[in-house]
Amino acid sequence: MVRNIVILGGNSHPKLVESVCSSLGLPACNRILGRFECGESRCEIKDSVRGKDVYIIQTGFGGNGAKLNDHFMDLCIMISACKTGSARRVTAVLPLFPYSRQPDLPYTKSGAPLYKADTQSSKKDYTFDSVPPTPGPGLPKSASLANGADITNRLLKASLTNGNGPASPLSNGNGKSNGEAYFPTTNGTTGANGTRENTSPTTQVAHFTTHDDYVNLSVVSAFQARPGYKQWVAQAGTLVANLLTCAGADHVITMDLHDPQVQGFFDVPVDNLYGRPLLQRYIQQNIPNYKDAVIISPDAGGAKRATAIADSMGVDFALIHKERRPTRITERQNASMILVGDVSDRVCILLDDIVDTANTITRAAKLLKKEGATKIYALLTHGVFSGDAVSRINASALDKVVVTNSVPQAEHKAQLGSKLDVLDISPIFAEAIRRVHHGESISVLFNQD
Amino acid sequence: MSAEMANEIKLISGRSHPDLSDKIAKRLGIEVARTISLNYSNQETSFTVGESVRDEDVFVMQSTATGDVNEGLMELLIIISACRTASARRITAVIPNFPYARQDKKDKSRAPISARLVANMLQTAGANHIVTVDLHASQVRSHLRGRDGFFNIPVDNLYAEPSFLRYIRENFDPEDCVIVSPDAGGAKRATSIADHLNTAFALIHKERPRPNVVGRMVLVGSVADKVAILVDDMADTCGTLVKAAAVLKENGAKSVLALVTHGILSGKAIETLNGSVLSALVVTNTVPLGDKVERCPKIRVIDISPTIAEAIRRTHNGESVSYLFTHAPV
């Protein structure tokens, strides 16, 4: 029993709240948290928080009948309610930090976005050959097509293979009979050399696996940047940090931030916990002969994370390098992934911080299989599994996916079955909360093994 | 207009109410800026800017779609923040229906003052100026109106009242009408309309045991043989309005209609309206109505875009906005 501490749970991950509370031996704070009929969040905190040390647990994951942004607003409102309720200190506990991945638009050297939308009609029949599009809004393209003859050719080709003729913009199964190919289609072409007339009726069927917004497909396809302006995507990480501080958070606890720089966005202390000890223990206990395995980072950004584990366990390390160079249209996108290191006849352990659409790890797994890996594990801290991730993983060469319960995993577990192993992070968070409350060092948590 | 003024109006539209944005843009004779908002499959909102806003006078139009308030709010914050990052000279958030305006006081222990939180968030994101219509709570307004409010930045609160006055004058004989406020809080708004029309005024007193539930109602004043016009700022579940209308009918009103600025119409509002004695519900288009107009033949819509467009034009040119408090541009 810890005194003067209040654990307040959001709606995003009730199970984690429960287990953190039972680890700490205290009940969760009584609160009403829901929505008015007009859609505004409604929050009332039933127990006194005056002079207390309040910890609000809300993960950055849309689910349980509400969207990600709803959960985030709930969090801000709860923080603000505790502040006005004279709480001594309010700590936001975000196992998965929302908006921590800062999307960027990959561009070719000529300035055109390197988007590839696949034309698969059904979400279910993913093979691991399918090439998902790079995340980014609605395949827009820069209008400066003066040197973009290459694009024009691609578009013409794409429109021809898709079968010309008027198609309803919203119909997904647009006469795509030859399922063996994935010709990239591009949306919202500018009127360079009359390509728009040729392509627009057919290219609008492009399937955005990384976007939920199918409703405004016409808007998406109509979007084009003003000529001469290179469009860019807003990056909301700083904003989210500022909003939390503005709501009144005095302290933030999170885990495995995608970008360690996010820590610097805050003016308040941020404790970034590591899932590493947990993953490391899993490797040691569950992977036979792990000393002979190879730890792989699926992209250069995660190399540091992966080498840290590889070094501490004395295991070999390899890296997959993603080349974002324009490839020829018929070339598989896998060709642009290069393995640095040797994996033949060995067990591979892919390590990353987050699996979202599972694009990176399934492609990496395919490459590893091709290079002769015997068995492929993927160990990730945050298992978001959005979009088609589940079917993609089921169809992939991955033998085992291991994630933590930083976001609710019950649904994913049901869909992925024995392929998915879930590690419990609630002891780490409970211990972190206890230590923060008592003013003890939490760096000990980083070194445990 | 001095040389330091921003050079151009950039109207950016959120996803909540593109229709209103288009009308405003048309009125201003400009195009809505080329931007696009989407949700990633992990539900994070992404916003792409397709044209330069550097040193421009940016107006971000975002209403709150019923049921999707938080989505709209986050999108608005992300847009504002993006424009600030992109070196906009001034960012004005045009929020016809201010979200969380009703949660403006700590009415219970540890209840959040969400309206203030939203105000703070908008400022944190980088808004320099707010334009809104018929704000529910005067607290939310700023110092500039001579009060201590939630905002430290200027807030222009526009009124739907001139549009309502015109509607009444065009459709009814003011002599024949009684303006009724459905609750004590709206008495000031209703008396103002009654004074302008030089008509009688009545008030309904209500008890409200719980949110979204309406208690007993008592009419103060006479509505016998008159057209009773209920005036309010918000029609949400319409429970209040419909009960008030029934009370007015019981007290001998010839017919009852309601003039409401924000037609939020959530939950079973449409069914409630269809089954009520209200002859018409007149709302402005501050909130996207969707298919509600088709589903409820009683709803009439007043276009508020001329007022908002004029406010944007005047704000941009540094002219006074107060003219709009008493006049509705045609």
Image (cartoon, grey):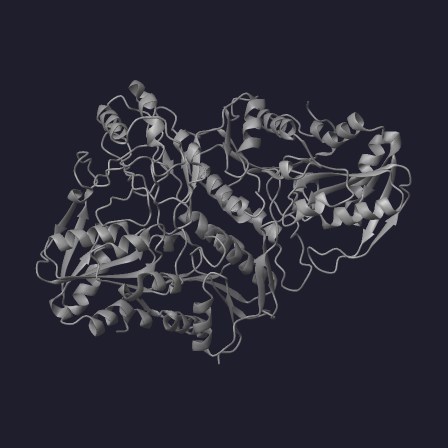
Percent across and percent down for residue A389 are 32, 53
In depth, the one of A251 and B193 nearer the eye is: B193
Which residue is situated farthest in the top direction here?
Answer: A193
Q: Is residue A242 left or right of residue A37?
A: left
Number of numbered tags placed on the structure image: 0
Which residue is situated farthest in the bottom direction here?
Answer: A1
Residue drawn 24% across and 49% down?
Answer: A127
Percent across and percent down for residue B302 are 68, 31
Residue A320 appears in the figure? yes
Percent across and percent down for residue A372 are 10, 56
Percent across and percent down for residue A299 are 22, 51
Q: Is residue A148 left or right of residue A22?
A: left
Residue drawn 18% across and 48% down?
Answer: A321
- Quarter of the image holding residue B308? top right
Residue drawn 69% across and 59% down?
Answer: B107
Q: Is residue B79 above or below residue B34?
A: below
Q: Is residue A227 above or below residue B82?
A: above
On-image quarter of the C terminus of chain A:
bottom left
Q: Is residue B1 above or below residue A66?
A: above
Residue drawn 58% across and 27% down?
Answer: B24
Q: Is residue A175 left or right of residue B113?
A: left
Residue A223 appears in the figure? no
